[in-house]
Amino acid sequence: MTSISRAKALQVRVVLLDADGVMTDGGLYFVEGEGGTLEGRRFHVHDGLAIHMLRRAGLEVAVVSSKISAPVRRRAESLGIAEIHQVSPFGKLEAVADILRRAGAAWDQAAFLADDLADLPVLQEVGLPAAVANAVPEVKKAAAWVGETPGGLGAVREFVEALLGARGEWSSLVEAYVAECVEHWRSRESE
């Protein structure tokens, strides 16, 4: 795994995530039922808590995917992600430009965790291009950070720990999260 410099990490204000192959393992699951065909995805719970930590750190989080998927939208919404863009590969740059404009951020203040060729245009523009372990060679070559964990198996968590660790925030965010959980439990015990 490559490292992220503190200066680069502190510059990031928006974290962009591809969905299929990054938040998921890239598999598409289809189940035939009475109501028709249902489509599913596999997500990792560690990634969800990592996204929660990004938001606790005050960073904007957005999903930018090349495929329309109801399970991806539901998962992102359940994590409190408001910016969910499911566009063609030719629309990713425009979607990210809109996200950055709404966030008041510049391209060099964005990180993008990616895996496939459709992500290359965005990777070439952001300040912190990143790739999951099983990304295609072209994406790994374009990335400043390459993880060791495959997409859908905790790759988002690995990236978030690296980013927030480089910012010097990961440990304090974990401590605050644990303290909040304990305090919540104690307050319920005293009722």
Image: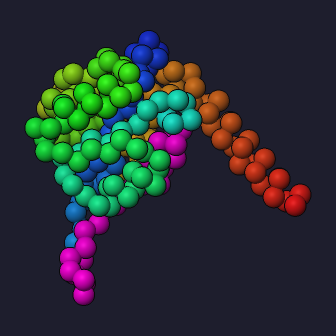
Task: Report the residue that reaches farthest toward the bottom.
Answer: 34
Q: What residue sits 42% from the left and 52% below the top?
A: 77
Judge whether 172 appears above or below 168 on screen. Answer: below
Please identify the quadrant where the C terminus is shown.
Answer: bottom right
Residue 36: % across, % down: 20, 80
Task: Report the residue that reaches farthest toward the top.
Answer: 7
Task: Report the residue that reaches farthest toward the right.
Answer: 190
Horizontal placement of 144 versus 74: left or right? left
Horizontal placement of 188 versus 45: left or right? right
Q: Is residue 1 visible?
A: no
Horizontal placement of 122 versus 159: left or right? left
In the image, 1 versus 87, the foreground residue is 87
Please identify the quadrant where the N terminus is shown.
Answer: top left
Residue 109: % across, % down: 36, 19
Q: Is residue 84 magenta?
A: no
Q: Which residues are magenta?
A: 31-53
Horizontal placement of 81 versus 33: left or right? right
Judge whether 13 appears above or below 119 on screen. Answer: above
In the image, 173 versus 61, the foreground residue is 61
